[in-house]
Image (cartoon, rainbow, N blue to C red):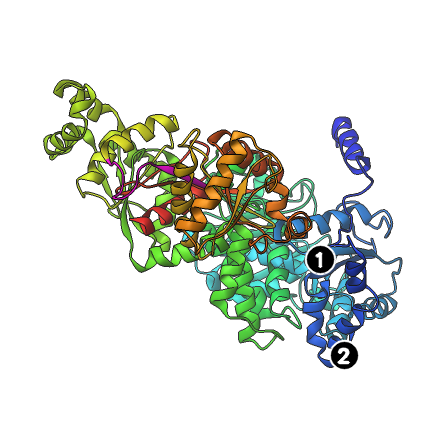
Amino acid sequence: MTTDLKQAALHYHRHPSPGKLEIRATKPLASQRDLALAYSPGVAHACEAIVENPLAAAEMTARGNLVAVISNGTAVLGLGAIGALAGKPVMEGKAVLFKKFAGIDVFDIEIDERDPQAFIDTVARLEPTFGGINLEDIKAPECFIIEEGLKQRMQIPVFHDDQHGTAIVVSAAILNGLEIVGKPLDQVRLVTAGAGAAALACLDLLVELGLNPANITVTDIAGVVYAGRSEEMDPYKARYARDTEQRSLQQALAGADVFLGLSAAGVLKAEWLPAMAERPLILALANPNPEIDPAAAKAVRPDAILATGRSDYANQVNNVLCFPFLFRGALDVGAREINSAMKLAAVRAIAGLARQQPSDVVRAAYGGQLHQFGPDYLIPKPFDPRLMEQVPLAVAQAAMESGAASRPRDLADYRAELQSRVFRTSLTMRPVFEQARANPRRVLFAEGAEEKVLQACQQALELGLAQPMLLGNRSLIESRIAALGLDLKDRLEIIDPADCAEFETYLQTYYQRVARSGLSPAEARETLRHSATAFAATLLQSGRADALICGSVGRYNQHLAQIEQIIGLAPGVARLTSLSGLVMDSGSLFFADTYVQQDPDAEALLEILRLSAGAVRAFGLEPRVALLSHSNFGSHDSASAQKMRRVLELTRAQLPELQIEGEMHADLALSEALRQQRFPLGQLRGSANLLLMPNQDAANIAFNLLKVVADGIAIGPLLLGTARSAHIVTPSITVRGLLNMTALAAVRA
């Protein structure tokens, strides 16, 4: 460890407050009534509900989402038996990984006890507190005794991550590695360096997956574990003792297909590798330094596939791919244990995810590097958001099918819940996605060669949301599809203006729309050749597509001018408007008008409100409208305040079904309690979900400010009032944002 890293780590743990954890209340404690509900006398009713039905503890308390990370500090990382107190930073680190990756709360508990039975007695008494137990950094063989003893006594999951988490990720890597080299698991020979808890757990799980025990050779510090050996033996490694003449790791490697190292740096020598079988898998997982340097291994065996425990090499075998998501699935169905079926389900889910199309989120997290299934990408990266959806779902399903679940779930609903944890817009977008799937429409992307557009098209096809169409240079689009590893060939239409057979027909359509704007026929031809939005809008106007998305490149107003000119207004609409949404922890909030009408009068605001309310209903929400101002219910008579009061009058007369109130401050719009104090006669109930601003400046500023301050996820902007479904996104939009817009555009087509 360098001096700079050491100092940075010490500073990180000291500041701004010591450690990495704190406890936050999840309920308000702002009034006497809150106190009466949180504690006496109200809390007694929650206690009585649990007495009547113990499973209600998962609904009344944090237990259903609370895991204990427990250690006695006898085998902490590569530091050894440093003790319970010195191991606490590691346990806190484990806790924050649970929270970061799976939203699971953790108490880290360090027990100063080396006697296995005393340790078991202590932990078993904690069962009422926790939904699961994660054992950590306990040395072998005591870890076997402790885990087995706790499993027998407790009715909640007990999981020694150093054993089983490692085994799950290693197994996923080996399954995928063997898939790449074309070797069946039941026929390969595997040699281990190391016979500790993690190594033996890996072997046990691989045998369950189909590895032939007769094809396993275990080695440790004393050499090959052979039948009759007495030195450095225990009952656990004795299970893998074999009748063999081999006595050293070097001898055992001859003809081996897989090397699994969970031992120490440098134990595997480069000169031994030529004796291994063709295209071997070498998993050198010792930390912090592997059993062999990957570069040295590749120098003598360029055909080998390598994995290590380090992030600076390809194929990092990292338990964080497993334990947060395994516990997420177990907790969510109230599992009584983590059994073999659940572990095998996790293996297959992790392995399967690596074989799927690359994730844009992973690419962004790793500096734009593309990760595609192959020798350098056997298992997913920890920041792949799909882990949170796919692994818990597989684990929960296995728990239910194996009888381990005390609270079975509907899997479709559970998948939707997991998706909402991964993509915060998922819950808001769910009704829109369902409508889009029911009638997939042709959605044309004007900037068809943009990478995030291509990735969004891949996801839209996989989810059945639309039939994407791409506008742009055909060869460039096809080369980028190949470079991104996307499965789009022959699955969507590419329209290239340079070779479009109907170009002259589209030119006539375009010129008819713009002839009176001062463009000559020659200028119109030039514009259509070089303006993606103009060509895309013409295709939409001609019925070649059902919906249009543009704006991934360029300025909003430039795109807007083309759409307004070519597509025009829907019947009965006098002006276009835009609607932007934010998904926050507190719920979804929509803002009008953020991009189009700069300073609308009251009549224009009424139309903006009518169009926006209709769009909000598409999300399955009933609009609750607040008219925002610096004035509160007549407290000021400025022109702006009078305008918003006039909007209220017009709305009550022309849109009486709308739940609306104003004019008011923004805090009153979002807090019914504050609003009741100020204006108890108001007709708006609950928190507003649609905010109508006096002008574009106010709407755009409020939207972008709240997006950052409240960590909101944007939906839109939606362009409302066009004759056909055409929408302008912003260049900062994410792939998920484009996917959402694809569904919205399809539904509005």
Left or right of 272, for residue 18: right
Residue 84 seen anywhere in this rendered image of the structure: yes
Q: Secondary structure at mark 1?
A: loop
Which quadrant is home to the N terminus?
A: top right
Q: Is residue 546 above or below residue 148?
A: above
Q: Nearer the viewer, residue 171 or 410?
A: 410
Judging depth in this view, the residue of 660 and 393 nearest the camera is 660
Count of number-bearing discs: 2
Instruction: Residue at 53% x, 53% y: name it.
Output: 387
* Image location of residue 64, percent across then percent down: 68, 65
Residue 165 horizontal/vertical position (percent) = 64, 57
Using residue 169 as the reference point, say whether residue 412 is left or right of it. left
Residue at x-position 31% and y-position 38%: 574
Residue denoted by label 2: 51
| Span highlighted in magenta in the image | 567-580
| 189 in relation to 489, above or below | below
Residue type for callout 2: Val
Viewer-side residue, 269 vs 746:
746
Magenta part mainly helix, strand or loop? loop
Residue 517, placed above or below residue 346: above
Residue contact between numbered discs 1 and 2, judged by CB atoms under 8 Å: no
Q: Which residue is mark 1?
A: 196
Give x and y (percent) for residue 297. Answer: 55, 39
Residue pictured at 78% horizontal, 27% vertical: 3
User: Hey, which quadrant is residue 565 in on the image?
Assistant: top left
Q: Residue at x 33, y 29 (%)?
A: 559
Residue 195 visible here: no
- What is the crowding at mark 2: few (fewer than 14 residues within 10 Å), some, or many (at least 20)? few
Query: Is residue 529 in the magenta section?
Result: no
Helix, strand or loop at disc 2?
helix
Question: Which residue is at the far bottom?
Answer: 52
Q: CA distance from mark 1 to mark 2?
A: 43 Å
